[in-house]
Amino acid sequence: MNREYLVELDRVDKAFVTRHFFHIDEDTRTRRIYNRRLVRAADAITFGIRPGEIFGLLGPNGAGKTTTVKMVSGLVRPDAGAVYVDGMHVEKKRKKVLRKVGVVLEGTRTSMWPLTPLENLMYYGNLKDVRGKVLRDRAHELLDFIGLKEKKNVQVRRLSRGQKQKLAICIALIADPLVLLLDEPTTGLDVQSSRAIKDKILELTRQQGRSVLVTTHDMHVAQELCDRIGIINKGKLIACKPTAELLDLFSGHVFVFKLDRAPDPARVRTVPGVLDCTVEQSNDGPALVLRVTDEPAQRSEGFYRVIELLREGGFQLRSLTQRQQNLESVFLQLTGEIVEERPEYTGEE
């Protein structure tokens, strides 16, 4: 256990067995299993989250993100390894850990829809031993903070999806937890609601010093919010680095020449220092996409030679930019897969 971290996972494993059945046999009134498969949702996962840090767990649906969140919150017991929150073993000190952790699982059914947002917060606050004036004041402060003050006495069933998601964050915060676990916090939201929730997550961390774990398959959410990112695929943590460092690791030197017409990429590839080049078509004309070597002197010479070739060919250079790396391309390079939508198995039949 490393006391540098507020949340720590130490070589955590978790596997589920999926079962699929035939229809009930009319004679025997029994079902028969026709497929039984072992799913590894977590395979020796190790990482930590520091106080005041937003840690992103990035990966496709089915990669093991939700299972990881549930193990940190104590909802799922790992098969091996250990999870610590504020120095406490989650399995051994579960009740104490629950007071320090707020969880927002994917979906909007955290709250009870016949009740109002204020009634929901009063109910969940009492469950977590927050009482009296402290609970009332905190409930009103949270609703004001999240932007639901005008909706506090409206039944949850009448709220929009974005408002329900905001209420779920309030419920997670009602006991003033040190750690906030957000599983796909912006899934299915409109742009305005998504922006509001991301702003609140940043405020909770930067101004209030909480540790936040955000799981998502949305590359833009991870890149915009997270200080560090772990990439998980098929239960394995295949990368874990600060966001900027992860992008720099795969950035390379790629330049985009916007031209008046398309050049011959085969001729450009003969230039020393040029590793590859392609021609892309866009609405504003063709673009020569050039990847050059990391060696400074050879890169410089190659770059100048390409410009000379374009000038000799009479090409009009409309713009020149360096292409920035993003998390989607990093994920592709690490896994060779696109981020695809598929159901995540969480142990529920």
Image: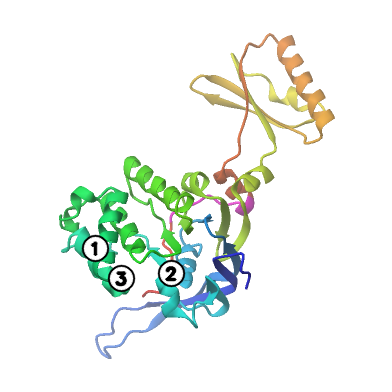
Q: Residue 163 in magenta?
A: no
Q: What amino acid is at disc 1?
A: Arg
Crowding near the residue tagged with mark 1, few <14, some 14–19, many ≥20 C-alpha atoms within 10 Å = some
At label 2, which amino acid type do we have?
Lys
Q: Give the range drawn in magenta.
A: 334-341
Q: In which quarter of the image is the C terminus?
A: bottom left
User: Mark 3 = which residue?
Assistant: 130
How many other residues sit within 10 Å of disc 3, few (<14), some (14-19) or many (≥20)? some
Closer to viewer: mark 2 or mark 3: 3
Query: Which residue is found at the position 57% from the left and 70% from the top?
Result: 9
Residue at 27 percent of width and 53 percent of height: 143
Q: Which amino acid does label 3 sit on?
A: Val
| Colouring scheme, one of rainbow, by chain, secondary structure, one colour | rainbow
Looking at the rendered structure, the secondary structure element under dot 3 is: loop
In this view, 254 is above or below 71:
above
Q: Which residue is drawn at 19% across and 48% down?
A: 150
Q: Residue 271: give x, y in percent of width and height.
A: 80, 25
Residue 333: give x, y in percent of width and height: 63, 48
Q: Is residue 57 above or below residue 46?
A: above
Q: Earlier in the sequence, mark 1 or mark 3?
A: 3
